[in-house]
Amino acid sequence: MRIQFLPALVFIVLASAMASSCQKETTINEPEESSPAPNSSNGNANEQSKKIHVTNISELYAAINNAENSGSTLVLAPGAYMLSANYPKAGRLELLHNMSLVGQPGHPEAVIVDATALPLSSFTIAPSNARTGAVRMGDGNNSIEWITLQNDPAHTIRSLIQTDIVTTPTTQIKVAHCIIKGSSIGLSILNRDPVANGRILEADVADNEIYDNTIQQFGSGIQIQNTLVNDAVLKVRLSRNYVHGNRAGMMIFNSTSQRCSLEVKSYDETIENNGVGLVLVGALILNATGPAIDNTFIYESYASSLKNNQGVPAPPFSFPAGGVFAPSGLAMTQFGPPGTAHNNKLEISFHGTAIEDNIGGAQINAYGAYSYYALPPNNNSTLAGSNNKTNVYLHGQSISATANAVNSIPTEAAGTNTANIYR
């Protein structure tokens, strides 16, 4: 498989699916409204930094684990780099401060970083046993470009790329021109745990093909989250990514967090043939003791395509299959009891985005509050929480998308949870 990126307004992706090859052509249109400035200030992969040329896996591990290489760009020669637990850090690749990884420009298929040989133990971090990715970043300014990152979907891992190295209060990351496939989470952008309280993370994610991420429990192409953290900020710019064949195309949420902020701006995205296209959650409850309070999430989509998300393979958890699932306050059955998601706000706007041919009676399903405890077999009348607000704004072509808005499941007599669709 080869992806070719052209400098004009036409972006062509040559993608091979699981067993057969097909060609996909996507025309990039200008947003109906002028695009705001990028969220991320991260530029290209440290163009002025020292370049270290790597030709094999031993050289890669030696270079990435040498503290003197902070601020360097590691340039990988064509070939397959099989990660192994026999190397430091259980075989994970952990980018040093301001370090970048670059493959062969124009040919992401030429450099393959493969996590299939890593045992499950390589994806936990001592002493907390938090789950992590095969490649970790988040120390200052980090970037990964022009590389294929892959795993055999029959081999369980957490994620291929994860932004959970927390050593600086602010960080800028960039993932561009990559192929990411075969994981539980392809790309995991997150602030997690109290160590990330108050952290500001800016991300630029562009021109990637992300597919075949189907491993339970998530099976998501891109996952963006503030989890078990307070006062943290995530600002993410997504552009021209082709996200397909995952259980969930993208899952974006605050979970068991307080006063956290998510700002995601999406341009010219193609999200198709996933179980569910977009899962957008203002705040969800992750455990019995941690509330989700006073979080905000703003999602803007411009000139994108959200089509043919038909529920095969089935989405993770119990998220309804289809185009967009968007509650402001969410209580998950498999986590702690409901009742502690309060004062969360979810604002969604689609500008000239085609939202069609997704499974279900409505292309967009919006909720003020949603508690799985209210559904069979639990049939519990306890609310997810109170004062959770979801507003969805449809502009241009997006006006034609069918949308369903429900204030609260179960029904809330006080009416503090609300969901609205504006056309």
Image (spheres, rainbow, N blue to C red):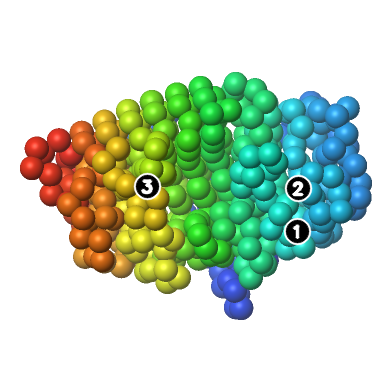
Taking 321 as reference, is 124 above or below it?
above
Q: How many marks?
A: 3
* Residue, far bottom: 19
> Residue at horizontal 25%, vertical 61%?
378
Amino acid type at image mark 1: Leu
Which percent across, then down, holds residue 260? 41, 28
> Residue at horizontal 57%, vertical 58%?
184
The residue pinned by badge 3 equals: 336
Q: Give the Cα separation between the discs numbered 2 and 1.
A: 8 Å
The C terminus, quarter of image: top left
Which percent across, then down, holds residue 93? 76, 45
Q: Give the Cα separation between the discs numbered 3 and 1.
A: 32 Å
Amino acid type at image mark 3: Gly
Amino acid type at image mark 2: Arg
Q: Nearer the viewer, residue 369 or 357?
A: 369
SS at mark 1? loop
Sequence-first tag of 2 and 1: 2
Identify the mark at residue 118; answer none if there is no mark.
1
Q: Nearer the viewer, mark 3 or mark 2?
A: 3
| Left or right of residue 388, residue 241 in this image | right
SS at mark 2? loop
| Left or right of residue 294, residue 21 in this image | right
| Left or right of residue 40, residue 300 in this image | left
Q: Count neighbours of disc 2 (C-alpha within 10 A) and say few if under 14, some if 14 to 19, many if 20 or more.
A: many
The residue pinned by badge 2 equals: 92
Q: Is residue 351 visible?
A: no
